[in-house]
Amino acid sequence: GKYFATFSFGENAIFAAIYTSEAFITAQGGNPDIGSYTLPRVGRGSAAVGNFSLNEKSLYVADSLGKKIYSINLDTKRFSEVNAPSPIVDVQTNPSGELLFVLTQNPDEVLILDAESRAILQRSRVGSMPGQMLYNQKLNRLYVSSRGEDTVSVVDLAKKEVREVKVGRLP
């Protein structure tokens, strides 16, 4: 991709450094040419999940226990917060960057948000202990691994239906 990010953690902060891929390679991890951000973090147990939007216009960083997603606009270098109703496991976008997919635990569900307005457009329950998700643009589906049930939840976004597919142990 065009961009590369590194994350480190402090007691109450997530530090994100964003580079163009070329600058990171030539500078061997030197000064971030896009920017550095210090984002609030809720304590030691909280992990961070970070993903660039597929259109490479934003970086989404989630504070899992803080139930917050920080959206960093790579053009304006500004960030904003999005609140989630429960602990965050994963964050993805569709290719245009218009939709934000947020995987949460307790309840175990996928939230589909309008990336600009942050409005929740759809909620879909998935199997227990969800771990990761993958978006298939061609089929307009999300695939969510559910370790608690050894299944993959297939979320059909057009039909707003979810079906469980039994797979091997700990998908």
Image (spheres, rainbow, N blue to C red):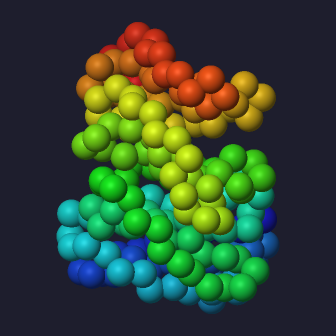
> Where does the N terminus fall, quadrant-wise?
bottom right
Residue 21, image x and y in percent?
A: 74, 69
In percent of width and height, residue 49 lies at 44, 59
Q: Is residue 153 left or right of residue 135?
A: left
User: Foreground residue, 106 or 2?
Assistant: 106
Residue drawn at (44%, 86%) of the image: 38
Residue 13 lies, in percent from the top left, at: 34, 81
Residue extending furthest left? 44
How many callouts does the rendering have?
Answer: 0
With respect to residue 3, does 129 lie above or below? above
Identity of the residue drawn at 52% across and 41% down? 122
Q: Is residue 80 left or right of residue 75?
A: left
For the point 37% across and 53% down, the residue is 88
Is residue 74 placed above or below 167 in the rendered structure? below
The residue furthest top is 166
Point out residue 114 in the picture as x, y percentages from the top left corner. 62, 56
Depth order, front residue of 119/14? 119
Q: Tell which of 99 and 142 is nearer to you.
A: 99
Viewed as shown, does residue 62 lie left or right of 141? Answer: left
Q: Is residue 69 visible from the viewing direction of this image? A: yes
Say if 161 sits above or below 17 in the image. Answer: above
Locate the C terminus by quadrant: top left
Residue 40 location, quadrant: bottom left
Please tell me which residue is depicted at 46% across the width and 12% down the height of the picture.
165
Residue 154 showing in the rendered view: no
Q: What is the quadrant of residue 126 in the picture? A: top left
